[in-house]
Image: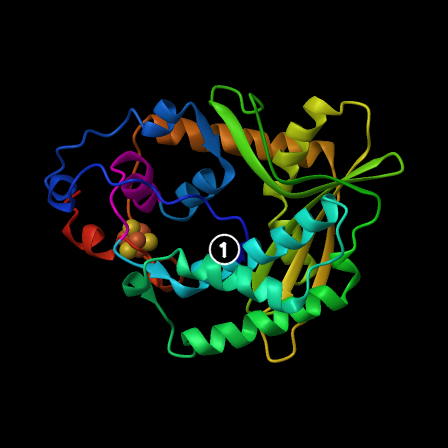
Amino acid sequence: MISLFPEPRASPAVSVSRVANATLPAGTPRERVRDYVSFSALSLYQRCSLRYFFRYVAQLPEESTSASLVFGKAVHRAIGHHFEELLAGNAPPELDTLLAEFNAGWDEAPADQITFPKTDTRDSLARLADRILTAFRDSDVSQPRGHILGIEEELRGPIIDGAPDLLARLDLLTKSEDTLSVTDFKTSKSAWSSDQATDSAEQLLLYAELVRQSFPDMPIRLEFIVFTKAKKVAIGRYTVPLNAARVTRTKRIAQRVWRAISAGHFVPSPTPMNCQGCPYRAACRQWSG
Ligand code: SF4
């Protein structure tokens, strides 16, 4: 499962051997230099803090890019183009236009760095993109109710105590009657369960806090739209309850994660799910602790 709006790639700054020789001291994460922190960075730290270190502290160049990440980014570009046309007052773009956007997005990734799982090829993923974008155009997801206020809208603010501003990029922000809707698009190998939507809610709960800063008096609705990457694409819509206690808990967890980052706690968390597709496997093997 990947966000359709992934983080930009980190720029290279130091060599693998430099990291392996532990010449980079723990602490003083460069997230501070960026003066903001993103949900995906915090989430990456929770999955594998050493991978966070390689990306955000050492800023190593990625050794590879997973095809599913490139795929999600390219689908995002196509869907974003669709909503931009609606926002401009134009007719919904044709499927061919969306596929051209998908291909342009795909071609942004260095072809020799893309790693494919055994089950996928460039052609099979192009066909999958065709099915997803066809399903998208045919569904009511492509025609949001009310007005589109933002596409990839960037919001930032000091909502995590002791941490830099949280920077968020909202996939889609709409207003219908007196309610704001924040929608996040995902692709997933299989349909989500309601528990999975609940477990994934932290991202949207933090984003809601940022939206509330600009629209303090308006009700906010949060939802995930999940495209299932299958022969027959399904589109799931999952509403995330905006629960005050859950928001507080999420902010406290983010605060603790930031404290751990600031203290320089970085250790590998090797699991098949974490390491498969990790772009820093060589650096991890060389890392001497
Ligand atoms: S290879 Fe695995 S343990 Fe090592 S940094 Fe990547 S995800 Fe973490």
Residue 105: percent from left, percent from top: 47, 57
Viewer-closest of 168 and 74 = 74
Vertical arrangement, residue 140 with respect to residue 88, above or below? below
In the figure, is residue 278 to the left or right of 135?
left
Residue 272: percent from left, percent from top: 36, 64
In the figure, is residue 105 to the left or right of 202?
left
Q: Quadrant of residue 186?
A: bottom right
Q: Quadrant of residue 273?
A: bottom left
- Tell me how the rendering is colored: rainbow
| Residue at position x 35%, y 26% in the image | 262
Is residue 266 highlighted in magenta? no
Secondary structure, magenta segment, majority class: helix
Vertical arrangement, residue 251 with respect to residue 93, above or below? above
Q: Amino acid at mark 1?
A: Lys
**Outermost residue, right side:** 177
In the figure, is residue 63 to the left or right of 21?
right
Residue 228: percent from left, percent from top: 62, 68
Q: Identify the residue position indicated by label 1 in the image.
A: 73
On the rendered image, what quadrant is the C terminus found in?
top left
Secondary structure, mark 1, is helix
| Residue at position x 76%, y 22% in the image | 216
**Count of numbered badges drawn on the protein:** 1
Pointer 1: residues within 10 angstroms few (<14), some, or many (20+)? many
Q: Which residues are magenta?
A: 49-62
Look at the image and tell me whether residue 1 can be seen: no
| Residue at position x 77%, y 65% in the image | 139
Q: Quadrant of residue 218?
A: top right
Vertical arrangement, residue 109 with respect to residue 160, above or below? below
Look at the image and tell me whether residue 123 can be seen: yes
Viewer-closest of 182 and 283 = 182
Is residue 60 highlighted in magenta? yes
